[in-house]
Structures are given as structure tokens and as C-alpha cells.
Amino acid sequence: MPDLARAAAARMEDQLPWYRALSAEDRSWVGLVAQAGIGAFVAWFREPDADLEITADVFGTAPRELTRSVTLRQTLDLVRTVVDVVEEHVDELAPRGEEQALREAVLRYSREVAFAAAEVYAQAAEARGAWDARLESLVVDAVLRGEADDALRSRAAALGWDSQSGVVVLAGWTPEGTAAQVVEALRRQARRVDVDALAAVQGGRLVAVLGGVEQPLQTATALAHCFGSGPLVVGPAVPHLFAAGRSARAALSGLVAARAWPEAPRPVLADDLLPERVLAGDTPARRALVDRVHRPLEDAGGALLDTVTTYLATGGALEASARQLFVHPNTVRYRLRRATEACGYDVTDPRDAHVVRVALAVGRLSVAPRRAVAQPATEAGTAEASASLHTDVVLPPVTAPDLTVL
């Protein structure tokens, strides 16, 4: 048997390039597996009625980590090489007249070894899949909490997310099915549209972190059927995973606030839900509305802010706005076009008018009210005030009633 093991190792060294590329430690483990396989075959051939325990006899000597260094295809190459070596030495191993029986036994045993190898790799894949699922859930949870620390970096690197760009977070409701089925369906669809996906089911909501996204809305449309019925909100695109917390907060806030806009498209951008998010108490959405609408109109000058305010107050009536502003209607049209260029919203559109109306209200609330500042009192003023407090009030004389009338 040692001669067969050495012959098998020499054949693998000569014919298998992947074997030569292995580290010395991995090569020694592969050699032990080959030697154990040959030894187990010889022991079984001597007692053919004994039960075959391929997994324990052959692969029990190797560590589980070897499945990461040697693939299943390479393992089958190993089995094929060892079988060829054994068949070449059949005449030396088998008694005279039993050569054919030995060849048949080799074929049967090699088949069992191949099935056992597939079982080992299947178990390793299941264990690795379960671990990856837990790791993926931890990464998504860290993104939702905005924890861009070293733990997130190491876990993301283990999942192959160390250099992803174009990251977008989707938030929607969970469809029917188990959490594993829902996440796997979303991953499978993400591979079809050529994006990377990390997903997790958190109660009734399904959150997906997508990487390599160039067109967020189009990608979300392709994945929409993987989510349950109801709104599907797309967070803003961020450059990398460690900034995905901003996209996640916007998407989750939009998912809560989307009920206030029943006619919202599906999917809908979180930035298109800014008014509803403000009503739901989202502070970043409040700042975004002020920065995108109120401040540009205020900084543009040319009475744009007054014109937009008047136009909205009159219900979008152009003539009424012109009368209140004492200008020609064409001037109002011109100012409204300039306002659209300044803030990006067209107040002649009902939805944009709603956004601008909320933005102007929020902008007014963001300005601190002016308070009258009391002037320091001088000594003369203090004396005058004190004198005014002690000024006698002269009342008209009270006359007694004339009782003679009674």
C-alpha cells in the first residue's frame, strides 16, 4: 500500500497542475486522503461483506478547511488519478484469476468515494451558507444602524464587499415565504440584473443593500416582484458600503411615510417622499427641503420667493397672482420659470406645488423669530419711569345720592 500511495502522489504531481500549486500543508493533507482511500479500499476488498464507511474512512483524516483549498472538481480528479494507479497495479495486487473481480471492486469503490466527496462538499456548502447568511444579516443590521466601523469592514470583506461602489438600499414589505426563501429569491434576481445584493428580513420588512448599481430606479423595478405588496422605497445612491447608512435611513423613513402619498409610484425614490417624510418627523428630510427649495428661492432674488408664495396662495391662478403682485401676468410666468430653474420644482405641477408648499412652510419655521431687544435704561429714564408709577390719579368727586326723592 505505501508503494501505491507514493505512486499516486507522483502521478498527481505530474498530471494535476492544481496539486502542484497547493501549499506544502495542503499537499500533505491531500496525500493523506489518497493514502487513506487506498488503505480503506484494501481493507474493504478483504472483507467485501463489511459496510462501506467512505466518509469517515477516507475524508475523516482531512480538516474541513481543505474544502476551501480543493474544489469538488479537483477532488474528482484526485479520485480518478488514484483509481488509474490502482488499476495499473491490479496484476500485482490481485491473486491469479481474480484480476477482473478487483477491477470491478475498484470501480464500485471509486463510485462510492465520488458520492462521499459530493456529500462532504454539500455539507460544507450548507455550513458555509448558514454562516454567510448570519454574517450577511449582521452586515445589513450594521448598515441600518449606521455603524461604519472595523467590524463592518471585516464582515463585508468576508462577503466580498470590500470594494463595492454604487450602493443603494431598498426597503419594502416582506412577501410570503420563509426568510431564507425570500432572501434567496432576491439574491437570484439580483444576479440576473448583474448587481450584488445583501438582504435581510426584519420583521415585516425586507431590506436589500445593492452594490454596483448604475440606474437605481431601473434596478429597483427589476427587483420589485421580490418584495411584498405595498410601497417599495429606493434610498439615494452612495459611493460605498460604509456610507450606506444614509441611504438606509432615507429608505426606511420613506417606507413609513409612503402611506401619506397613496398615488406614489412603485418603486419610488426616497427623495420624492420628502414632504411626507417631513410630516412623519424626519429631520434630515426637513433640512433637505430647506436646502433644495426654500434657500435657493430666497438666494435667487428677483422676488421669486414672493411670486411663488403668492401663486400658491391663490391656488395657481396666474391673473390673481399678477394683480396681487401689481405686475403683468407674463412677468409672473417668467418668474415661475426662473423659480423652476432655481429649485428644480415646477409649481404649475400639482405634486411639485405640494412639495414647494411644504418646503416654504418648513423654511419659514427654520428661521428664528425676531425679538425686540430692550434698551438699557438711563438714570433719567429710570426716574421718569418711577415717577410715572407714582403719579396720582385724580378721580371725580363722588356725590351722595339724593335720598329726599325716596
Image (tube, rainbow, N blue to C red):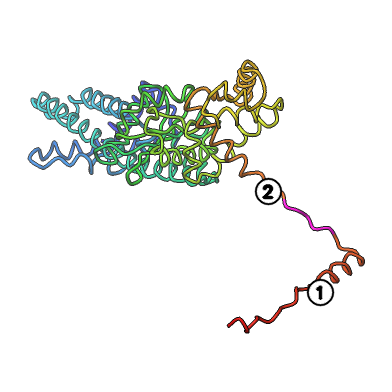
Q: Is residue 137 visible?
A: yes
The residue positioned farthest toward the top in the image shown: 330
Q: Residue 379: which quarter of the image?
A: bottom right
Please determine whether, in this image, residue 280 is positioned above or below residue 405. above
Residue picked out by circle 2: 369
- Quarter of the image with the N terminus is top left
Within the magenta stretch, is there residue 251? no
| Residue 53 x %, y % | 17, 42
Secondary structure beneath dot 2 equals: loop
* Segment colored magenta: 371-375
Circle 1 Cα neighbour tier, 10 Å, few/some/many (<14 / 14–19 / ≥20): few
Circle 2 Cα neighbour tier, 10 Å, few/some/many (<14 / 14–19 / ≥20): few
Q: Amino acid at mark 2?
A: Pro
Magenta: main secondary structure = loop
Q: Does residue 100 appear left or right of residue 225 in this picture?
A: left
Of the two numbered discs 1 and 2 on the same chain, state the one appearing first in sequence.
2
The residue positioned farthest toward the right in the image shown: 380
Label drawn at residue 392: 1
Which residue is pictured at 65% across the width and 80% down the height?
A: 401
| Residue 175 x %, y % | 28, 36
Between the residue at mark 1 and the residue at mark 2, the CA separation in whole angstroms equals 39 Å
Q: Is residue 2 visible?
A: no
| Residue 362 x %, y % | 58, 41
Please determine whether, in this image, residue 228 is positioned above or below residue 345. below
For this rendering, which residue is in front, 77 or 339?
339
Which residue is pictured at 38% across the width and 37% down the height?
A: 199
Within the magenta stretch, is there residue 373? yes
